Structures are given as C-alpha cells and as structure tokens.
Image (spheres, rainbow, N blue to C red):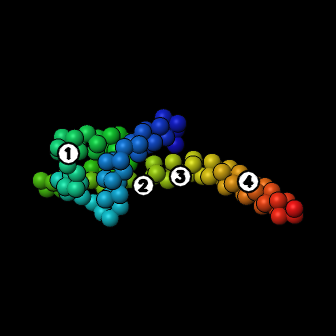
C-alpha cells in the first residue's frame, strides 16, 4: 500500500457515518437506499460518503438491474491493519515495560 492510499484509507475512516456504512456492509451487499436508511441525512449526502469510500477502494459498486449495489472491499483495511500492527507491537512492549516498572515501584513501597 502506498502512503497515499494509506492516507486515503485513514481519511475515509475518520468519519463516523462512513465507518457505520462499512459496518453495515460487513453483513453483505446493500443498495444506496438501504445504506441511507438508518441516517437522518439526504441521499445526496450518503452518495458523497459512498464516493469517498469508493475512491479509497474500501467499497465496490456494481449495477444489478435497476439497483446500484455496494459491497465491502476489505483489502485497504487489511493493509492499514498491517501498518498499524507495527505500532501495536511497540505500544504493547511499552505497556509491558510500564507494568513491570509499576510492579517494582509498588513492591518497593510495601517494604516500608
């Protein structure tokens, strides 16, 4: 994943409406109307969110008869997760060291 596509992925994920749309698509394909249903925003606003998700390659759109179906495209999320995992390892190690330090400090205070 290039840093530009990574930026597009994180930018698209920054909006709670777009994250909710992706969450809905985890259960399967949906029409624009079905995706818009739980939100109190206009269809054009939903369409703008879908364009952002499509540009970031997080969703696919296809024509099925008179419907435009959207589906989840998980590859950019996998790539973002792989990028984040390097930092997850760093934080887990740092938190482990902090825990060990706190255990030592607490043990020292128990002595007297």
* Callouts 2 and 3 close, C-beta under 8 Å: no
Residue 84's place in the image compared with 111, above or below, is above
Point out the tag, 1 or 2, that comes first from the N-terminus.
1
Q: Secondary structure at mark 4?
A: helix
Going by the image, does 31 lie left or right of 20?
A: left
Mark sitting earlier along the chain (4/1):
1
In the rendered image, the residue lying farthest to the top is: 4
- The residue positioned 37% from the left and 43% from the top of the image is 15
Residue beneath disc 2: 74
Q: Position of residue 77 (x, y in %)?
A: 46, 51
Label placed on residue 77: none
Q: Secondary structure at mark 1?
A: loop
* Point 22% across, 56% down: residue: 38
The reply to whether discs 1 and 2 touch (Cβ–Cβ < 8 Å) is no
Pointer 1 or 3: first along the chain: 1
Q: Residues within 10 Å of mark 1 (few under 14, many from 20)?
A: few
Badge 4 vs badge 1, beta-carbon distance below 8 Å: no
Tag count: 4
Task: Estimate the spatial distance between the alpha carbons at disc 3 and disc 4, rounded to whole Å.
Answer: 25 Å
Q: Residues within 10 Å of mark 3 (few under 14, many from 20)?
A: few
Which one is closest to the eye, mark 3 or mark 4? 4
Q: Residue 66 location in percent, x, y?
A: 12, 53
Indicate which disc, 4 or 2, sits on the residue closer to the N terminus.
Answer: 2
Residue 67 in view here: yes
Q: Which residue is mark 1?
A: 41
Sort mark 2 into few (<14), some (14-19) or many (20+) by Cα contacts within 10 Å. Answer: some
Q: Which residue is mark 4?
A: 98
Q: Viewer-proximal residue, 91 or 62? A: 91
| Tag 1 near tag 3, CB within 8 Å | no
Q: Is residue 31 visible?
A: no
Of the residues tagged 4 and 1, which is closer to the observer? 4
């Amino acid at each position: 994943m290039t840093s530009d596509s990574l930026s597009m992925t994180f930018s698209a994920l920054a909006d709670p409406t777009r994250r909710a749309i992706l969450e809905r698509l985890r259960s399967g394909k949906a029409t624009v109307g079905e995706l818009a249903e739980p939100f109190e925003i206009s269809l054009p606003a939903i369409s703008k969110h879908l364009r952002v998700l499509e540009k970031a390659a997080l969703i696919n759109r296809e024509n099925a008869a008179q419907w435009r179906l959207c589906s989840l495209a998980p590859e950019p999320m996998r790539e973002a997760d792989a990028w984040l995992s390097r930092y997850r390892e760093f934080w887990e190690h740092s938190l482990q060291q902090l825990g060990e330090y706190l255990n030592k400090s607490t043990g020292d205070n128990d002595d007297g």
